[in-house]
Image: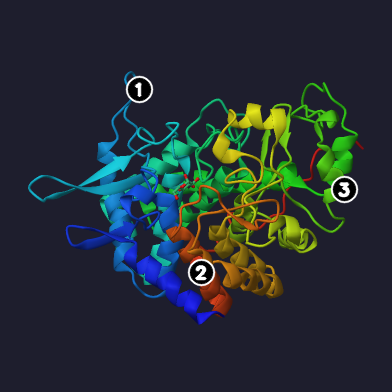
């Protein structure tokens, strides 16, 4: 362990704390002078606060996390309906900031995606809020917060909103492009893995939070059923290994009705060339997205790691994901843990998928950049699968580069060996992710904070098969 690095990360985390009327309520996304930081990086983002919160909770600093949870909850009243839409009280903001009036009084201003570049709706925010609430209760033992009427009401509202019938035929959740950590156009609309993993995390967190509430038993039953179906569906249809690739390679298409095997009509011709030689015999992972005639074969790290941490993948599958990390270390870890998405899209595909976004050029930012914040889920997933060796290797790689580079937001290049061209420095979740990664390695018992509710111990039914 590099003590100087730990100290530097703590120093950054401490200076990032945002206060409102004298109380700590969150951490800003990046610490930098106003002219050196992107317009909204002085905001506290819900998703960016998660690794900060995990560090605070591990250190027994519960107040800031509690304040954050209640503050964000209060912000929902600022959500104005779009003309012609109804007010949706369950939605949570992407970020918020403290502003100062002329008389010096402070106010909070939330962004529900109505200010964000590209106007993206943060679907992940309400999920992270519930997941963090459950983690907070476990860590602090303060179940009174979850029992509070307003909080319960909010949890129910979020659950009802995400279980509401839409135009779905599958247990997965349909969302627009860029509605989570990848918050700009990247061809991640539809059923992206990260949202599905968070949806599962939300469902099992609600089951934990409302378990003692007599009135909520019907809602809890629905949550349990959906969680179970979602997990089975992800295991059956998102899972990819060489056997499965062989099946897809020989898929029949244009099948109709109940007995069809290739239900989504995925054309074998859509299998990208890179995957055939890249996928090792013993490795496997959950694909990035699934829809009609569409399997996004890209490897999205956060979704896969969260799937391991939340218990979506079976033990064997989790181990195979870590085996993929081992066998494709240079591609998925390289010089800075860890690659967000592998591989990058280039050429016409980049033009069509990203709308020619110059920030997301191949092997940069969301399009194949390496993000230090992924250290914590990577270390957590490695420890959970008995691969402490990989966790240590990843931390060693980060120890050597991160502090000297002033905690950048992301790295560029196939191997992540260039500091991201437009990366913010002193990016707080890079430091917090590093700190929590180290904390997990020192005390794997902290994994219990993430909970381990199993909606059903049964194994999934067999995948429809041609034979
Ligand atoms: C970028 C990231 C997003 C993050 C934000 C603030 O927009 O894509 O996930 O929340 O920066 O750090």
Residues at marks 1 and 3 touching, judged by CB atoms closer than 8 Å: no
The residue that mark 2 highlights is 403
The image quarter containing residue 428 is bottom left
**Which secondary structure lies at badge 2?**
helix
The residue that mark 3 highlights is 277
Q: CA distance from mark 3 to mark 2?
A: 36 Å
268 horizontally vs 43: left or right: right
Q: Residues within 10 Å of mark 1 (few under 14, many from 20)?
A: few
Q: Residues within 10 Å of mark 3 (few under 14, many from 20)?
A: few
Q: CA distance from mark 1 to mark 3?
A: 48 Å
Residue drawn at point x = 67 percent, y = 45 percent = 234
Residue 276 vs residue 364, the one in the foreground: 364
Residue 20 horizontal/vertical position (percent): 21, 56
The answer to whether residue 27 is visible is: yes
**Which secondary structure lies at badge 1?**
loop
- Mark 2 or mark 1: which is in front? 2
The answer to whether residue 225 is visible is: no
The residue that mark 1 highlights is 85
Residue drawn at point x = 80 percent, y = 31 percent = 270
Residue 396 horizontal/vertical position (percent): 63, 73
Q: Earlier in the sequence, mark 3 or mark 2?
A: 3
């Amino acid at each position: 362990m590099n003590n100087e690095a730990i100290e530097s990360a703590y120093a950054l985390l401490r200076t990032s704390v945002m206060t409102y009327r004298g109380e700590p309520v969150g951490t800003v996304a990046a610490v930098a002078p106003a002219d050196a930081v992107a317009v909204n990086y002085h905001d506290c983002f819900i998703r960016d606060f998660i690794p900060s919160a995990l560090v605070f909770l591990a250190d027994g600093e519960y107040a800031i996390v509690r304040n954050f949870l209640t503050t964000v909850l209060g912000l929902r009243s600022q959500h104005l309906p779009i003309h012609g839409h109804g007010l949706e009280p369950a939605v949570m903001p992407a970020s918020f900031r403290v502003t100062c009036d002329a008389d010096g009084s402070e106010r909070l201003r939330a962004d529900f995606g109505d200010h964000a570049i590209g106007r993206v709706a943060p679907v992940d925010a309400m999920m992270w809020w519930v997941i963090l609430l459950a983690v907070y209760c476990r860590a602090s033992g303060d179940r009174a917060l979850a029992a509070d009427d307003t909080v319960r009401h909010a949890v129910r509202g979020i659950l009802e909103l995400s279980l509401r019938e839409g135009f779905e035929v599958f247990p997965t959740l349909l969302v627009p492009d860029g509605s989570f950590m990848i918050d700009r156009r990247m061809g991640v609309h539809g059923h992206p893995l990260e949202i599905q993993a968070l949806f599962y995390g939300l469902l099992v967190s609600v089951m934990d939070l409302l378990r003692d509430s007599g009135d909520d038993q019907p809602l809890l039953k629905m949550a349990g059923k959906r969680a179970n179906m979602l997990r089975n569906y992800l295991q059956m249809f998102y899972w990819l290994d060489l056997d499965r690739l062989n099946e897809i390679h020989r898929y029949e298409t244009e099948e109709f009705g109940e007995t069809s095997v290739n239900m989504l009509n995925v054309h074998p011709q859509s299998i990208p060339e890179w995957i055939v030689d890249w996928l090792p015999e013993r490795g496997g992972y959950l694909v990035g997205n699934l829809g009609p005639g569409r399997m996004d074969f890209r490897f999205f790290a956060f979704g896969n790691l969260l799937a391991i941490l939340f218990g979506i993948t079976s033990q064997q599958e989790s181990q195979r994901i870590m085996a993929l990390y081992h066998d494709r270390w240079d591609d998925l870890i390289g010089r800075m843990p860890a690659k967000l998405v592998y591989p990058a899209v280039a050429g016409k595909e980049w033009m069509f998928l990203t709308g020619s976004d110059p920030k997301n050029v191949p092997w940069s930012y969301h399009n194949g950049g390496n993000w230090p914040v992924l250290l914590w889920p990577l270390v957590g997933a490695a420890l959970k699968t008995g691969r402490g060796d990989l966790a240590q290797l990843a931390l060693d790689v980060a120890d050597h580069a991160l502090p000297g580079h002033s905690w950048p937001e992301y790295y560029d290049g196939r191997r992540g060996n260039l500091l991201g061209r437009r990366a913010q420095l002193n990016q707080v979740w890079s430091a917090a992710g590093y700190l929590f990664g180290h904390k997990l390695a020192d005390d794997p018992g902290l994994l219990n904070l993430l909970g381990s509710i199993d909606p059903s111990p049964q194994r999934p039914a067999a995948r429809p098969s041609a034979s």
